[in-house]
Amino acid sequence: MSDPWYRTLVQAQDTIATTTSTFWSARGVKSLLLPVTTGSISSPMGLGSDSEPVLVELNGAPTYLADSMQFMLEYGCRLSPGGAYYLMPSFRGEMPDATHLNEFFHSEAEIPGELDDVIDAVEAYVRTMSGALVAEHAEDIASVAGDVTHLEDLHSSPASLPRLTFDEAVAVLGRLGGEVRTDPVHGFRTMPRESEQLLMEHCGGMLWLTHFDRLAVPFYQADVDGKAVAADLLMGQGETAGAGQRHTTGAEARAALAAHNVAEEEYAWYVTMKDRYPMLTSGFGLGIERFLLWVFNHDDVRDLQLLPRMRGRVILP
């Protein structure tokens, strides 16, 4: 109760929540109030999935705790043409570690437009949050982070963040001695956290990593010539936000499901929505605790929970 770390954490969480609301409201993007359960998880057990789903039984019926409600935000764009967002818990089943939580807060939005449009929105969003945190809590944050120059620099910089395509990043890592992993069966490439750190150091602290191999990301990301129209924002301890352009039509989504070896049955409604209401949208998800890792200049996301929740443990309260 007396630890200044947690008092500062509460202040930062509150500022992020209020800033998120005002930021999207000013842009005409509507808040959606959504359930935490779903039958259509966004990281199914198929190619490109990077998390384990959390299956529960609710009054005798199996369902999932949502790892993301991105699909519902795409639905929301059909109801709110300016876009939709939420700030709510998400759930992942893998073992927690310094950069992964089983239950975390997810700031997600979906807007009309292409990948570049949502990248611009994410940059404006993190700059706005950085400015608000400095304006309201500079002294407290400095007491736990050492200083707030990283927040001030991001907020005040007029320049867009650096970008590297995955292919460009592979070339850079070859010069820096970084590792890139290749799936032995399907041939797509991924990047470990250590290589993300090398790229951040190379680019001055943060960057967008874009256009991954198609099968390295989930089926819902659009693709062109075998490359996903997607991007990860690397800052702090690594990936903090993930963004992507979605398939516009049902035919595109069906082809992607097949390519990723994901059964269409649980996503029939999603494909049908794109059949009946084709719409070009792009969206992102930002992990609040991972963003706060960067804000607090810290290295373990488990310390950014007010009430810890960990796989296989009953924790009170």
Image (cartoon, helix red, strand yellow):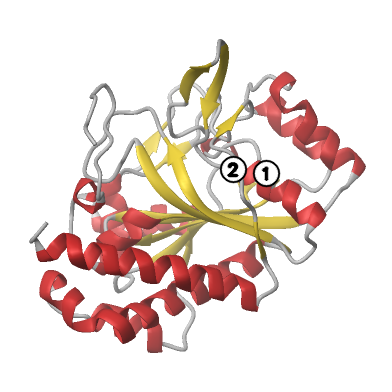
- Give the image quarter of residue 238: bottom left
Can the viewer see residue 236?
no
Report the residue that reaches farthest toward the left: 2
Q: Quadrant of residue 37?
A: top right
Residue sitting nearer the eye, 206 or 170: 206
| Foreground pick, 178 / 255 | 255
Nearest the viewer among 176 and 233 is 233
Cα gap from disc 2 to disc 1, whole angstroms: 5 Å
* Image quadrant containing the N terminus: bottom left
Residue behind mark 1: 72
Mark 1 belongs to which amino acid?
A: Met
Q: Secondary structure at mark 2?
A: loop
Query: Can the viewer see residue 284?
Result: yes
Name the residue rendered at 38%, 81% in the picture: 132
Quadrant where the image shows the C terminus: top left
Quick check: marks 2 and 1 in contact, CB under 8 Å? yes
- In the picture as drawn, the residue positioned furthest to the top comes out as 60
Residue 159 at x, y percent in the picture: 47, 85
The residue positioned 67% from the left and 50% from the top of the image is 73
**Residue underneath mark 2:** 69
**Helix, strand or loop for disc 1:** helix
Residue 288 at x, y percent in the picture: 38, 57
Quadrant hosting residue 112 = bottom right
At 52% across and 35% down in the image, what residue appears? Answer: 66
Along the viewing direction, whichever of 223 and 72 lies nearer the viewer: 72
Three-letter code for the amino acid on which mark 2 is drawn:
Met
The answer to whether residue 206 is above or below residue 315 is: below
